[in-house]
């Protein structure tokens, strides 16, 4: 059985979005308990590495960081940029 690059890409995106979602939930739980928190740069890095959908889902599912403008604007902005990149890569060469 061979694994294509597309299969690996989908597996990566599934994994990074799952990680971003879980990390958002863990940070919310830690915030409620007054424990050590996940740095914001980690949350943004996970989103920038392809986990923007998972991060956004985690934000709204766990009601976490939804009052912080940099998250409410930043996470969707990352998703828009990623969508644009995907569009250019996959459809940019069509004539």
Image: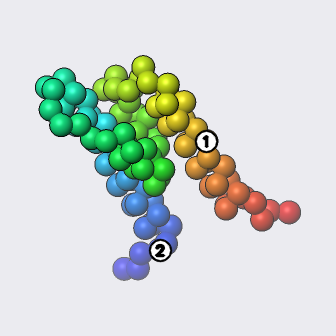
x then y, percent, for residue 32: 19, 23
The answer to which of 15 and 70 lies nearer the viewer is 70
In which quadrant of the rendered image does the C terminus lie? Answer: bottom right
Residue drawn 39% across the image and 45% down it? 41
Determine whether 1 is above or below 23 in the image.
below
Residue that numbered label 2 is attached to: 4
Determine whether 14 is above or below 36 in the image.
below
Secondary structure state at the residue bearing disc 1: helix
Earlier along the polypeptide chain: callout 1 or callout 2? Answer: 2
Separation of disc 1 and disc 2 at Cα?
26 Å
The answer to which of 58 and 64 lies nearer the viewer is 64
Foreground disc of the pair 1, 2: 1
Residue that numbered label 1 is attached to: 80
Which color scheme does this rendered protein use?
A: rainbow
Residue drawn 36% across the image and 80% down it? 1
The answer to which of 26 and 15 lies nearer the viewer is 26
x then y, percent, for residue 78: 55, 43
Residue drawn 46% across the image and 41% down it? 53
x then y, percent, for residue 59: 38, 30
Residue 7 shows up from this direction: yes
Residue 17 shows up from this direction: no
Q: Residue furthest right?
A: 95
- Please give left or right for residue 86 compared with residue 94 in the image: left
Q: Which residue lies furthest to the top in this view?
A: 67
Secondary structure state at the residue bearing disc 2: loop
Residue drawn 49% across the image and 25% down it? 69
Number of residues whose C-alpha sits closer than 10 Å to that of mark 2, classed few (under 14), some (14–19) or many (20 or more): few
Number of residues whose C-alpha sits closer than 10 Å to that of mark 1, classed few (under 14), some (14–19) or many (20 or more): few
- Please give left or right for residue 76 compared with residue 66 in the image: right
- Disc number for residue 22: none
Q: Which residue lies furthest to the bottom in this view?
A: 1
């Amino acid at each position: 059985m061979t694994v294509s690059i597309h299969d690996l890409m989908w597996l990566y995106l599934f994994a990074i979005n799952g990680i971003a979602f879980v990390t958002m939930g863990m940070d919310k739980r830690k915030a409620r308990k007054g424990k050590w928190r996940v740095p914001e740069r980690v949350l943004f890095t996970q989103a920038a590495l392809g986990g923007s959908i998972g991060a956004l889902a985690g934000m709204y599912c766990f009601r976490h960081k939804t009052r912080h403008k940099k998250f409410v604007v930043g996470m969707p902005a990352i998703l828009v940029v990623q969508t644009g990149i995907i569009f250019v890569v996959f459809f940019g060469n069509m004539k």
